[in-house]
Image (cartoon, coloured by chain):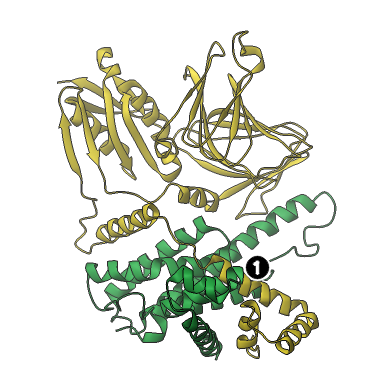
C-alpha cells in the first residue's frame, strides 16, 4: 500500500501497489497529472513532460513485474520522474554546448568559456518541483483555497462564493493549507 | 534550500503576511539572487498547478502504455491486437490498432534523435555524438540528404528542427539567418520552426514557398508528386506558388492554420483543404506509415522510399485501388504481404542486385 503522504489521500482512492492491470490504470489516473506537472517544473515543456511521464509509468510497470512490489509507490514514481527530467536537461545542455562551440568556432577556441549548462535555473526548477509536489499532496479543499488566494489574491468572500463554502471557513482552510505545505516541504528536504 | 522559512514565503505569496513578515521576506529576497530564484520557483508552481492533460492526451497515453505493456509480455506475443473490417464495395480493408500517443510528442522524439547541426554562413557540419568529425563547407549552400529507407533529424543553427523523410534533400542557403532563413526542399520534411519576426523563415520547393508564421508543419514535394503539399499541425504558415510558377489568376498567398492542407499544383494553382486529419501527415515522423484510401500506386511509392526496396504492380489496373491501413515498426516483407493479402493480390519477392523487389499481382 502507498504511504499517505505521497498519495493524494483526499482526492483519489489509494491505489493498490501489488495489483494487475486494473490497479495500474488506477495508479495512472491518480498520478499522471501530478507527475506531469512535477516534470514540467524541470523541463519547461508540456509535451516533453508528457513524454517523460509516459516512460516513467512504463518503467515502473516493467520493474514491478520483475521485482517485489514497491512499498512507497508515490515516492518511487516521483524519483523516477526527477531522474529522467534531469537526464533530459543534461542532454539539452550537451546539445547546447555543441551548438555554442560551433557558433563560436570562428572566434575563440573550442574550449572557450563553457556556455550556460544544466545548472542554470536549476534552483528555481527545484523549488517549483518541490512546491508543486507538496501542493498536489494537499487535501482538495485546502489546495483549492490556497490556489485561488495565491493566483489572484481573491478576497475570502470571493473564494467562498467560488467554492460554495461558508466564508468563515476560508481562513481556516487557508491556514491549514499553509501549515501543511510547510510540513510537507520540510519533510521533503529533511 | 534547507533553511528557508517556507511558511513565511507561502504567506507572502498568498498575501496573508503581516507587514513585518512582508518586510522580512523582502529583506531576504534582497540578500541574494538565489532567494529571488526560489521565490520565482514558488510562484511558478502555483501558476502551473491547474495544468492537466487533455482527456484526449490522457486517454492516448494510457492506451499507449497498455499496448506497450502487452507487447512486453513474457510469452513473446508482441503483436498488438488487430481488428479487421472488410468493406467489399470499395475494395478496402481497414486494420485498426489501439489508439496511439498524441503526435505532438513525435516532435520531441524527432528532436531528441541523433542530430546533425547545420551551420549558417561559413557552414560546419558534424554529428552530435562525434564532434571530432568536422567538415568545413564554406560559402556554398549546405546540403543534407537522405537516401531511401533513411530518415534524419537536423537542427539548424537557429534551433529550427527539420526531420527529413526518406529520399529527401534539404539545402540551407548561405547566409542563413542574416536576416532571412531560407531553405530549399526536395522530398518531404517536418519543420519545427522557432518563430522570429526579424528573421523570417521560408521553405522553397519546386512549386511553392511556405513562410513560417508560427510552429510546426510538414512539406511534401517529391519529384514524382504532381503538387507540393503543406500541412500545418501548430501555428500559422503562409503558402504561395513559387515565383516562376505563379499564374496570373492565382492569389498571392494563403494562410494555412492547424488542420489545413495547402496544395500548389504544377500550374501554380493554390488550393486549401480544411478539416484534415493532421496525424496522418505527421505519422511518418513517429515511425508510422498511414494510408487512408490511398491509391495502391502511391502506397507502393511510399513503401519504396521508406524501406529502400522496389515494389512493382504486375497489373496496371490495380494502381488505383484504394488502401486503408496503418503500419508501425513492421518489416517490409510483412507490410507487403499484408497489403497484398488485404487486396486479394499475391506478392512475389525477388532478390536482385539493387535489393529486394516485391511484385504484386492478381491471383
Q: Is residue B195 rendered to the left or right of residue B58?
A: right
The outermost residue toward the top is B248
Image quarter where the C terminus of chain A lies is bottom right
Tag 1, which secondary structure? loop
Q: Is residue B190 visible?
A: no
Instruction: Find chain A in the image and tell me its colour.
Output: green
- Dividing the picture into quadrants, the one containing residue B214 is top right
Q: Is residue A37 rendered to the left or right of residue B201?
A: left
Q: Position of residue B170 (x, y in %)?
A: 60, 32
Q: Position of residue B180 (x, y in %)?
A: 74, 34
Q: Is residue B293 rendered to the left or right of residue A74?
A: left
Comparing B81 with B12, the one in front is B12
The outermost residue toward the right is A107
Q: Is residue A139 rendered to the left or right of residue B2?
A: left
Comparing B306 with B83, the one in front is B83
> Mark 1, chain letter?
A
Q: Which chain is yellow?
A: B
Residue at horizontal 58 percent and vertical 49 percent from the top: B115
Residue at horizontal 39 percent and vertical 54 percent from the top: B57
Q: Which residue is mark 1?
A: A118
Q: Position of residue B279 (x, y in %)?
A: 41, 40
Comparing B147 with A159, the one in front is A159
Residue at horizontal 77 percent and vertical 76 percent from the top: B33
Residue at horizontal 53 percent and vertical 74 percent from the top: A157
| Category of crowding for the residue at label 1, using alpha-carbon neighbours closer than 10 angstroms: few (below 14), some (14–19), many (at least 20) | some
Establish if B154 lies above or below B47: above
Q: Is residue B294 visible?
A: yes
Image quarter where the N terminus of chain A lies is bottom left
Establish if B57 lies above or below A149: above
Q: Position of residue B139 (x, y in %)?
A: 78, 33
Establish if B138 lies above or below A57: above
- Dividing the picture into quadrants, the one containing residue A14 is bottom left
Amino acid at each position: 500500500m502507498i504511504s499517505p503522504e505521497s498519495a493524494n489521500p483526499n482526492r483519489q482512492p489509494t491505489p493498490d501497489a501489488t495489483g494487475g492491470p486494473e490497479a495500474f490504470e488506477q495508479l495512472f489516473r491518480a498520478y499522471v497529472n501530478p507527475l506531469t506537472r512535477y516534470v514540467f517544473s524541470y523541463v519547461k515543456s508540456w509535451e516533453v513532460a508528457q513524454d517523460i511521464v509516459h516512460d516513467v509509468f512504463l518503467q515502473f510497470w516493467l520493474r514491478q513485474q520483475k521485482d517485489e512490489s514497491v512499498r512507497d509507490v508515490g515516492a518511487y514514481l516521483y524519483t523516477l520522474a526527477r531522474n529522467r527530467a534531469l537526464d533530459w536537461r543534461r542532454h539539452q545542455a550537451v546539445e547546447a554546448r555543441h551548438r555554442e562551440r560551433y557558433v563560436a568556432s570562428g572566434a575563440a577556441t573550442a574550449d572557450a568559456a563553457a556556455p550556460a549548462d544544466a545548472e542554470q535555473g536549476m534552483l528555481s526548477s527545484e523549488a517549483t518541483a518541490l512546491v508543486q509536489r507538496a501542493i498536489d499532496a494537499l487535501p482538495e479543499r485546502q489546495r483549492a483555497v490556497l490556489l485561488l488566494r495565491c493566483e489572484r489574491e481573491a478576497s475570502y468572500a470571493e473564494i467562498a462564493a467560488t467554492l460554495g463554502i461558508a466564508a468563515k471557513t476560508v481562513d481556516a482552510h487557508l491556514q491549514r493549507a499553509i501549515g501543511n505545505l510547510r510540513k510537507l516541504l520540510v519533510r521533503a528536504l529533511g | 534550500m534547507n533553511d528557508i522559512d517556507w511558511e513565511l514565503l507561502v504567506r507572502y505569496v498568498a498575501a496573508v503576511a503581516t507587514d513585518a513578515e512582508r518586510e522580512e521576506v523582502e529583506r531576504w529576497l534582497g540578500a541574494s539572487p538565489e532567494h529571488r530564484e526560489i521565490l520565482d520557483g514558488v510562484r511558478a508552481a502555483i501558476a502551473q498547478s491547474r495544468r492537466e492533460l487533455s482527456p484526449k492526451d490522457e486517454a492516448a497515453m494510457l492506451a499507449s502504455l497498455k499496448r506497450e505493456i502487452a507487447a512486453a509480455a513474457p510469452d513473446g506475443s508482441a503483436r498488438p491486437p488487430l481488428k479487421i473490417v472488410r468493406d467489399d464495395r470499395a475494395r478496402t480493408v481497414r486494420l485498426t490498432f489501439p489508439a496511439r500517443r498524441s503526435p505532438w510528442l513525435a516532435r520531441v522524439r524527432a528532436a531528441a534523435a541523433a542530430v546533425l547541426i547545420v551551420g549558417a554562413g561559413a557552414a560546419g557540419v558534424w554529428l552530435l555524438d562525434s564532434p571530432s568529425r568536422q567538415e568545413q563547407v564554406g560559402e556554398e549552400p549546405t546540403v543534407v540528404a537522405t537516401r531511401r529507407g533513411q530518415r534524419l533529424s537536423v537542427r539548424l543553427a537557429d534551433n529550427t528542427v527539420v526531420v527529413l523523410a526518406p529520399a529527401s534533400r534539404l539545402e540551407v542557403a548561405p547566409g542563413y539567418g542574416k536576416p532571412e532563413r531560407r531553405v530549399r526542399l526536395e522530398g518531404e520534411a517536418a519543420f519545427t520552426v522557432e518563430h522570429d519576426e526579424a528573421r523570417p523563415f521560408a521553405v522553397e520547393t519546386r512549386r511553392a514557398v511556405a513562410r513560417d508564421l508560427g510552429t510546426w508543419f510538414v512539406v511534401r514535394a517529391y519529384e514524382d508528386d504532381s503538387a507540393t503539399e503543406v500541412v500545418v499541425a501548430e501555428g500559422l504558415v503562409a503558402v504561395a506558388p513559387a515565383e516562376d510558377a505563379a499564374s496570373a489568376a492565382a492569389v498571392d498567398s494563403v494562410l494555412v492554420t492547424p488542420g489545413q492542407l495547402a496544395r500548389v499544383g504544377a500550374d501554380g494553382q493554390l488550393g486549401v483543404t480544411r478539416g484534415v486529419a493532421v496525424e496522418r501527415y505527421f505519422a511518418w515522423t513517429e515511425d508510422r506509415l498511414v494510408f487512408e484510401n490511398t491509391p495502391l500506386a502511391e502506397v507502393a511509392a511510399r513503401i519504396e522510399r521508406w524501406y529502400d526496396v522496389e515494389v512493382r504492380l504486375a497489373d496496371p489496373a490495380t494502381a488505383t485501388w484504394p488502401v486503408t491501413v496503418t503500419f508501425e515498426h513492421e518489416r517490409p516483407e510483412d507490410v507487403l504481404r499484408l497489403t497484398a493479402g488485404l487486396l486479394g493480390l499475391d506478392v512475389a519477392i525477388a532478390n536482385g542486385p539493387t535489393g529486394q523487389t516485391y511484385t504484386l499481382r492478381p491471383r
